[in-house]
Image (tube, rainbow, N blue to C red):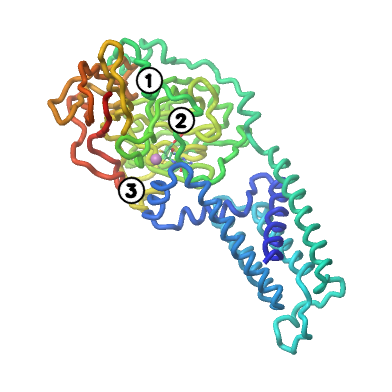
Amino acid sequence: MALGLLSTLAGLAVAELVVGTVRGASSPVLPVGQEVIDIVPPAVKDWAIAWFGTADKAVLILGTVFSLAVIGSVVGILAVRGSRAYAYAVTAVVGLIGVWAVTMRPDPTFGKVLPPLIGTLASIAVIWWLAPEPAVPPVTASPATEQPGVAGSTGADRRGFVRGAATVGLLSLVVGGVGRSLRGRFAVDDEIASLTIPEPDDPVSTPAAVPAQAEAAVPGPRDFEIDGVESWVVPNDDFYRIDTALAVPQVPRESWRLRIHGMVDRELELTFADVLARPMIERYITLSCVSNEVGGGLVGNALFQGVRLKDLLDEAGVQDGATQVVSRSIDGWDCGSPTSVIMDGRDAMLAIAMNGEPLPAEHGYPARLVVPGLYGYVSATKWVTEIELTRWEDFDGYWIPRGWAKEGPVKTMARIDRPRSGRTLDANGDGVIDIAGLAWAVHRGIGRVEVSIDDGEWLECELAGVPGDDTWRQWRYQWRDAPPGEHTVRARAYDRAGEPQPAEPKGVAPDGAQGYHQVRFSVE
Ligand SMILES: Nc1nc2c(c(=O)[nH]1)N[C@H]1C(S)=C(S)[C@@H](COP(=O)(O)O)O[C@H]1N2
Ligand SMILES: [Mo]
């Protein structure tokens, strides 16, 4: 068993070394896990997200490593029992799965196949070196006879094995460590830190430049700054992250290109410098995930800067009948949005900055799409490299065959941040309890929020200011003379047109959760 684990370790370590020398290659564990993500039925994935939340990736990687360890142990037992041929065969099959997974990823290159290939060879070499010779000379036709009975192999000598094992173990750690540190060369952290974002031509601070937004703007503080309520702007480090990428794609901006093609009059290909040289807008936009449960945290508001998608598409010349804008990322993920939505004048953009900084790698560096009013899964492609104009019926994005709706407008929703469920609150000195949270109806705007305490009448809440209709809005209700004991509170929002959020409770699939957020709490 120890032998098998060692051969697995050595294989992974050598693979890691290869990863450190080939740009774009990844540890074999990742493509395999990635294939698992793409192949498992949607129900399993929903279950994983529900159980592990954003730790689902770590769990999957651990699971893959654990499976490798189990298989490794079996290989070790096989090898020690004298069935070396089986040990080699199982190792080779595992290696082939690794190679296969790489070839299934977008843009497979020869270099990317090397880590699982060379890693497998290393595993096999370790078995060959450390596995004992069969005690009984093999009968002809036994699998073992197919193996070269090399004189140098260590044989059954226990001390020899321990020495060999220690050598392999140590070497693996060193080799793996060197690979890890070499790999750091390919990370984009440094170039992100050194990127200066030009001033936007149409900044958010001069509403005059934003007629549509200015009309919907409401003056006043955007943040009531109430304890326990999420801040109106979510800092980049706290912003929720959802994607199918097991390892964050590291895309150097020098190599990045955006190709706009399909049903257009002129194909465009932009470099990052081309994007920087274009007129840019700056807007607060609330991004939300279709997998967000009622009351959940997969939603956030940030200041995005970038080039209007409409400008780019107008330049390319959208042809009649091109009803779908398909966008693809460097890691093969894709989605489709209605052309009519992208072109209707809203601030859909190719974003390169978030909250005044270059896009963080996790949020799509060097460039991503953001479309106010659509859930991320049908619009917000990170690490975007391709935009294709096509017909609505001719293509379905990544999540559509997996059971999600093809159109994904963001549903109106109110979330209670304070009190938290199960919390006990003290009334303020003046006997007031703040009930507060956030509400969003992205691109329609929030017009009203109400709460109902202990199933009582609906009470109108105070609303914070907003720059326009594309962001969430803080709200609060100051509850006076709250009696001690157990209470419940529910909240509901209306968009600016007066449309209330849907009341009937529904889960996240296929088109987003709905229903009123309710919180139980007590007052002392
Ligand atoms: N390349 C890529 N882009 C993607 C996704 C993805 O899986 N891959 N997920 C989308 C989904 S479902 C959401 S909700 C948003 C989340 O963006 P964020 O991680 O910056 O918050 O990104 C979208 N863009
Ligand atoms: Mo999402």
In this orientation, which residue lies closer to the viewer: 173 or 514?
173
In this orientation, which residue lies closer to the viewer: 141 or 351?
141
Labels 3, 2: front one: 2
As helix, strand or loop, the secondary structure at mark 1 comes to loop
Labels 3, 1: front one: 1
Q: Residue at x 84, y 75 (%)?
A: 150
Location of mark 1 (residue):
227
Disc 3 residue lies near ligand 2 with CB under 8 A? no
Q: Earlier in the sequence, mark 3 or mark 1?
A: 1
Residue 4 vertical position relative to residue 239 in the rendered view, above or below? below
In this orientation, which residue lies closer to the viewer: 309 or 292?
292
Q: Position of residue 156 (x, y in %)?
A: 80, 74
Quadrant of the image for the N terminus?
Answer: bottom right
Q: Are marks 2 and 1 in contact (CB under 8 Å)?
A: no
| Ligand 2 positioned in quadrant | top left
Q: Residues within 10 Å of mark 2 (few under 14, many from 20)?
A: some
Q: Amino acid at mark 1?
A: Asp
Disc 2 residue lies near ligand 1 with CB under 8 A? yes
Location of mark 2 (residue):
239
Q: Among all residues in the image, which is located at the extreme right?
A: 151
Q: Amino acid at mark 3?
A: Trp
As helix, strand or loop, the secondary structure at mark 2 comes to loop
Q: Among all residues in the image, which is located at the extreme bottom?
A: 140
Disc 1 residue lies near ligand 1 with CB under 8 A? no
Quadrant of the image for the C terminus?
Answer: top left
| Number of the label disc, if any, that sits on residue 404 | 3
Q: Classify residue 111 as left or right of residue 59.
A: right
Q: CA distance from mark 3 to mark 1?
A: 36 Å
